[in-house]
Amino acid sequence: MSNFDKIKSITIKQPLKLDCGKEISNFPLAYETYGNLNEKKDNAILVFHALTGDQFASGQNPVTNKEGWWNYAVGPGKAFDTEKFFVICANVIGGCMGSYGPGTIDPKTNNPIGTNFPVITINDMVNAQYNLLDHFKIERLFAVAGGSMGGMQVLQFVSNFPNKAKVALPIACTASHSAQNIAFNELGRQAIMSDINWKDGLYDGKTSNPDKGLAVARMAAHITYLSKKGLQEKFGRNLQERSDLKFGFDADFQIESYLRYQGSVFVDRFDANSYLYITRAMDYFDLTKQHGGNLSKAFKESKTKFFIISFTSDWLYPTSENKDIVIALNAIGADVGFVEIKTDKGHDSFLLDVPDFLSTIKNYLSTTYLNVNERRI
Amino acid sequence: MKEEFKVISKLIDEKSRVLDVGCGDGILMEYLSKNKVVDIRGLEISKEKVKKCLSNGLAVVEGNAESDLKQFPDLSFDYVILSQTLQAFMSPENVIKDLLRVGKKVIVTIPNFGHWKIRVDLLFKGEMPITKNLPYEWYNTPNLHMCTIQDFYNFCNNKGINIFKTISLNGQKTSKITPSNLKYKNLISELGIFLLEK
C-alpha cells in the first residue's frame, strides 16, 4: 500500500489506560474530516466506523483509491450534509489505516507489533477518539453517529461522556454482543489463525500474510451482512460464466464467485491481525454488564437526544436488539426516537443506498440542529 | 387547527411530560410543542408516519400501543393522550389500563358512535354509517370497537376510573358534558374528550 503519507493523524501523548490493564501513550490516531467547522463550533459530527471501515467515510480513500465506506450518507447535500456539518471520522485503535494497531511497526524490531499489541475494547476505541474534541477545540459535538460497531461506539461514547453530544444516532447495532455475533466472529478468527502464514500473529506483513485465512473470514462475515432474500434475488442459482455445472470445485455459482472476489479484494486493504483485534473488541462489548446489568444506567446522566434505526432484514443486529436500547432509554424518560426501516438489504443496509433511511436521517439532523440551537437545550 | 387539539391543549398544564399514543403524523405533538412548554414523546405504529415525525425532529418511537406501552415506567408521564385511536385496538380495556398506569392523567378522545346522524343512517338506510370521523366501509375499517360517549362513560364508572372532565365537540362547538346532559350530548356530539385518572 502506498499513499499512507496522505493520512492525517494526531499523536495522543497522554497515557490511555486500557480495559486490559495495560497503558498506551504517544500513539497515532488517524482521522479525516469533511465540511467545515463553523465559528460557534456547534456543527461537528463524530462518525464511528464499523469493523472493516476506516476514517475515509466519504470521497476517495487515498490509500485504496476506493470510494469512502459511507459515500451514500456523507457528503454535500447528503444525509450527513457536509455543507452544513463538519464530519470527523477516525480510524479506531487496533485498525490498519494509520491508527495505532497490530500493524504498526515496532521501532525496536522494525517489524509489525502483531499479537504483542494489547487487546483493546470498544471503550478504549472511544476514549482514544475523544482526544479529537480537544484537537479541534470542540466543547460539545452536535452529534455522534455510526452503524454496526460504529453504533456500539456511539452508545459507549454517550455513556462515557454524557453531555458531549447533543444527538446520538446508533444504527443497526446492539448494546451487548450476542452468542451468535461472537460465534460468527470466532469463525473468522479461526480462519485467520489456521492460515499457516499467520505465524501466531507475527507475520512480517511484507513477504507473507495470512491472506487465505483473512479472505475466508471476510467471505463468512459477508454472508451475515446480507439477507437470504437479497442473496436469492441477486444471485439465485445463477451459474458463473458457464452454461452447466462442471462437476468440480471451481466457482460454478455466481454467489461463490462473488464471495471469492469479496475475499480477495479485502485482503489487499485489511490486516489480518486488525481483524482479530477488532472482532475481539466487538465480542467483549456488553454495555449492560458495564452498568451492573441495567442498560438504562449507561444513559442516566445524559441529556442526549437519541435516534435509533434498525432494518427489517438485518438478522445480525436484529430490530429486537436495537429495541432493547430504546426500552432502556424510555425507562429513564430519555428523549428517544426509533424507526425500523423496511429493506431487503440486510445488515449492510446502513452502508447502501436505502432512500428512506438516508432521507429520514437528513431531515432529522437538519430539523434537530435548528431545534437544539434555538432552544439552547 | 383541529378543534380537538385546542381542547386537548387547554387540558394540559405547562411544563408537563406528555406521551401521545398513536401520534400519527405528529401534528398534535407539534401543536403542543409550539403552544405549551411541554416535553413530549410519541408512539406510532405506522412506519411511514414515524419517519415523518422523525423528519420533523419529533421524539417518536415506532411501536404498537397494545404491546409496547409496557416499556414506559409507572406514572412516567404527567399526561398520556389517546386521540381517536381507542376503537382500533384489539383490547381497548387493556390499553386504557396501561395508559392509566403510565400517565398521571389520561386524555382519551373518541369518535361518538351515538351521534344522531349515525343513528339515523342506521335506522333508515340500514347500512353501516360513514361519516367525516368514521370514513370507512364496514369491510375495511380499522375500527374494531366502536363505542358511544355513553358507553365510554359507563365503562369508566364500571371500572372505577375517575372522570375529571368530559367535553363534547360538535363541529367547532365545545361544551361540557355532565351527568345531567349526558343523554343529550351523546346525541349531538361528534367527539367526546375525557380527562381521566386512576
Image (cartoon, helix red, strand yellow):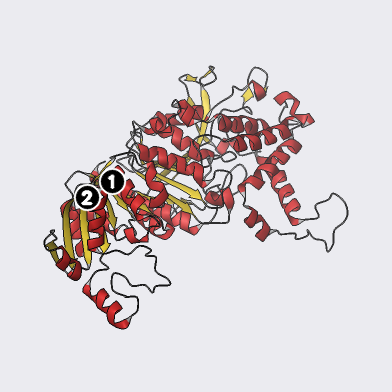
Q: Which residue is mark 2?
A: B196
Residue A291: x percent and y percent?
Answer: 43, 27
Q: Rate crowding at label 2 as few (under 14), some (14 to 19) or many (20 or more) other CA atoms within 10 Å.
A: many
Quadrant housing residue A264: top right
Quadrant housing residue A54: top right
Specify the quadrant that holds the N terminus of chain B. Answer: bottom left
Looking at this view, name the residue that lies furthest to the front.
Answer: B158
Host chain of mark 2 = B
Looking at this view, name the residue that lies furthest to the bottom.
Answer: B125
| Residue at 75% over, 25% down | A199
Residue A181: x percent and y percent?
Answer: 60, 37
- Gap in Å between the C-alphas at discs 2 and 1? 8 Å
Q: Which residue is mark 1?
A: B100
Specify the quadrant that holds the C terminus of chain B. Answer: top left
Q: Contact, CB < 8 Å: mark 2 with mark 1?
A: yes
Amino acid type indicated by mark 2: Leu
Residue A362: x percent and y percent?
Answer: 41, 53
Host chain of mark 1 = B
Q: Earlier in the sequence, mark 2 or mark 1?
A: 1
Nearer to me, A133 or B91: B91
What is the total number of numbered labels drawn onto the structure image?
A: 2
Q: Secondary structure at mark 1?
A: helix
Position of residue A363 in the picture relative to residue A197 (left or right) = left
Position of residue A111 in the picture relative to residue A89 (left or right) = right
Amino acid type indicated by mark 1: Leu
Q: Rate crowding at label 1 as few (under 14), some (14 to 19) or many (20 or more) other CA atoms within 10 Å.
A: many
